[in-house]
Image (spheres, rainbow, N blue to C red):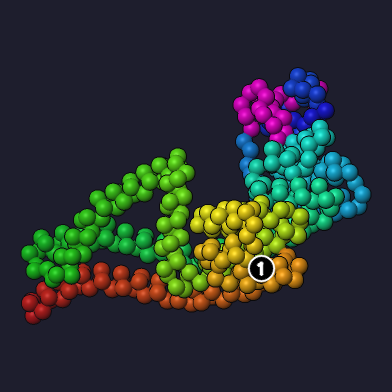
Amino acid sequence: MRTFEYRGFDAEGRSSRGLVEALDIKDVRERLAERGVYPEDLRAAGGTPGRGRTLRRGAMGIEMRALLYREMAALVQAGLPLAAAMQVLIDSPELGEARRHLAGVRDRVRDGSALAQALSDCAPGVAAFETAVIEAGEKAGTLDVVLERLAGFMEEQERVRDRIVTALVYPTIVVAATIVIGVLTLGILVPRIGGMLEAAAIPLPALTRAVMTTARALPWAGGALLAAVLGLAAVAHRRNDLKQWIRLKAAMLVRRVPVIAAARAALIRLRFARTLAMLVRGGVGMVEAVTLAGRATGHEEIVVASLRASAAVKHGSSLADAIRSAPVLGESLPGWIQAGEASGRLPDLLDNAANRYQQQWERGVTRALSVTEPVLILLVSALVLVIALAILMPIMSLNQALQ
């Protein structure tokens, strides 16, 4: 028996969708017909489409995967077989749309696949380091322990991500407001007032002429810039090498801003150290663990550096020496790694390092926001002041001439 997902209509014309276990597509249609459901879309859960249009399939978010791993660990610890544990979760409404993906994973496990491989095949959004840790846990017979650790790790990463988003809300609003004010003022207000001043044959100060020239050039320059950005984005979407080059250049640019660079470096070290600690503790080999930890940082230059470090470890180098040449990571992390290798407690030392980096990151974010917020306010004020002076100066000159 396999699980299929369907979307269709019942006898009264109402939309109907869900999961059904059957032998094949034909059996699915027969079972649905008995229920009075007429399927429009059919496919094996987590598999390839059947006849009809394909169902839309979204990736499982990190929060949902953390919940899934934690509950699966609890059920396995309670003595349930893995497939039975997943069946309990599929019947749980709190998993929502994730049940469709989990049904496909369960079918693969029933057919003899390992959980790591089944997740990789059927669950969109599952990262490579997650499957690596789960695979190591399956081989060591400690799947429940590994799943619980993985859930805790992912919940912490989600909290870090939430803090980043929260920290960026205010600057984003201010920047967006600045752009809107600038475009509306230069695109609508300045041209109208400028036309009135020119019609009155009033001598215009240099500042007013400069602002009016900028307002006239704004539609052309803005259109050209928008076209260039959209064209570059379209090309980068098709070419991974260009996308990686843009990310590397952006990372190099951010590193030149001292306040932002400090918080960014602490966040990279935090993610790398925490991920590497979890992978090593979960039984993943060091060569693979270094590569996966580099990917988990989300920064292209660290991914490239982690590949070089992984190759060095593979050829006999110590991890501390291999990391020492990596940008950002090589400044302080090798000392923690060296102490962990010497004491045989590498995962514990990496966790301690990650805790230290998390404190540095939180201080860096606070410091960056304390500098960024007043700077943004000053920029908005300066923009409004320049435009106001450009409009008022010729009017004041005309008023003085009339007096």
Q: Residue at x 22, y 60 (%)?
A: 214
User: Quick one: quadrant of the C terminus?
Assistant: bottom left
Q: Which residue is mark 1?
A: 337
Is residue 53 one of those drawn in magenta?
Answer: yes
Quarter-of-image position of residue 25: top right
* Frontmost residue, 149 versus 17: 149
Q: Amino acid at mark 1?
A: Ile
Quarter-of-image position of residue 215: bottom left
Q: How many marks?
A: 1
Q: Residue at x 26, y 53 (%)?
A: 221
Q: Residue at x 72, y 59 (%)?
A: 280
Q: In the image, which residues are magenta?
A: 34-55
Q: Residues within 10 Å of mark 1 (few under 14, many from 20)?
A: many
Residue 53 vs residue 36: left or right? left
Residue 331 vs residue 153: left or right? left
* Frontmost residue, 390 versus 319: 319
- Vertical relation: 195 (above or below) 125: below
- Vertical relation: 36 (above or below) 288: above
- Toward the front, the furthest residue is 316
Give coordinates of residue 100: x percent, y percent.
72, 38
Give coordinates of residue 365: x percent, y percent.
54, 72
Secondary structure type for disc 1: helix
Kindly tell me whether residue 244 is visible in this rendering.
yes
Give coordinates of residue 42: x percent, y percent.
69, 27
Is residue 147 one of those drawn in magenta?
Answer: no
Q: Residue at x 79, y 29 (%)?
A: 2
